[in-house]
Amino acid sequence: MAKRELPISSSLEDYLEAISEIVERNEHAHTKDIAEKLNVKMPSVTNALQTLSARGLIVYRSHTPVRLTRLGAEKAAIIRRRHQTLHKFFAGVLKVDSRDANEAACRIEHVFREPLVSRLVTLIEAVESRADCAALREYLARTMPTINLDPDSELISLDRLPKHRRGVMTFVADTLQSGKKFADMGLVPGAIVEFEGTSPFGGLIRIRLMDTSLSLRASDARHFWVRMMEEPCGK
């Protein structure tokens, strides 16, 4: 198998990314700089650099700066593009705090491959620049910051959600009958629901899920647990 075809682990991808960033900033990368950036011990750095060198991705010799080979620079550029794309999606589209966006990108970037990255870039560019996405941009800017939940905040059953307040479904009790039917309706953990009111027929509540109004029995709603979202600014 040629060196180009040898896969590398997520950990080694982190090393390549770190080396590329250090070289871009300092014009060279010493092992001490790499250890500090990744917060790892020197023996771990040495082992990783030896492996990357064996793959033909870096030039590594004791007591000299680490250099990326052409192949290593290409691979590092791909990894960094993945990270930058994911960070832009989380921070720009989902309106996540930049530090949290960076952490999420670090965790997810290793499982993204082309053409997923290219498709995500296309989505980001469309949301950010297309004229026919103006309403969507306004909606995301208004709504995304409200999906900011304190994991220690109180859980309430869906039937206790105040009228016209929204909540994020956190879990569904195992005691719910016909759970698959409700899952097919979209009532699953992570769904955003709004309480619209009580049905005039009694015993039923109305909720909005995306663009759909649903009616369900209050006795069933008690099996769904949500955390209330923050109110949108100006509401």
Image (cartoon, rainbow, N blue to C red):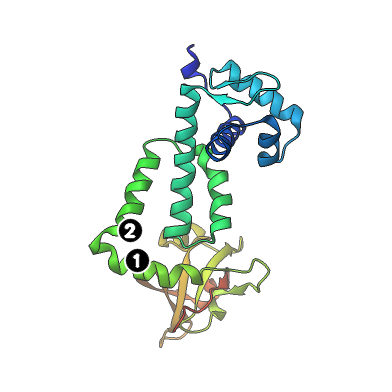
Type of amino acid under label 2: Val
Where residue 134 appears, as percent x and y from the top left, is: 28, 67
Q: Where residue 208 sits: x, y (%)?
A: 41, 73
Which residue is labeled 1 in the image?
A: 137
Name which of mark 1 and mark 2 comes first in the sequence: 2
Question: In terms of secondary structure, where does tag 1 sit?
Answer: helix
Q: Which residue occupies 65% across, 74% down?
A: 154
Q: Residue furthest left?
A: 132
- Identify whether 111 is placed above or below 179: above
Residue 211 appearing in the image: no
Q: Nearer the viewer, residue 44 or 93?
A: 44
Say which amino acid is labelled 1. Answer: Arg
Task: Please state the total of marks drawn on the protein image.
Answer: 2
Label at residue 104: none
* 95 in relation to 25, above or below: below
Question: Could you say where residue 3 lies in the image, as x and y percent from the top left?
Answer: 50, 15
Which image quadrant: the C terminus?
Answer: bottom left
Look at the numbered discs 1 and 2 and tell me whether their residues touch, using CB distance below 8 Å: yes
Check disc 2 and report the residue beneath it. 127
The residue most toward the bottom is 200
Residue 195 appears in the figure: yes
Q: Residue at x 57, y 64 (%)?
A: 170
> Does 74 sit left or right of 48 as displayed?
left
Can you tell which quarter of the image residue 64 is in? top right
Q: CA distance from mark 1 to mark 2?
A: 7 Å
Please provide percent x and percent y for residue 31. Answer: 68, 30
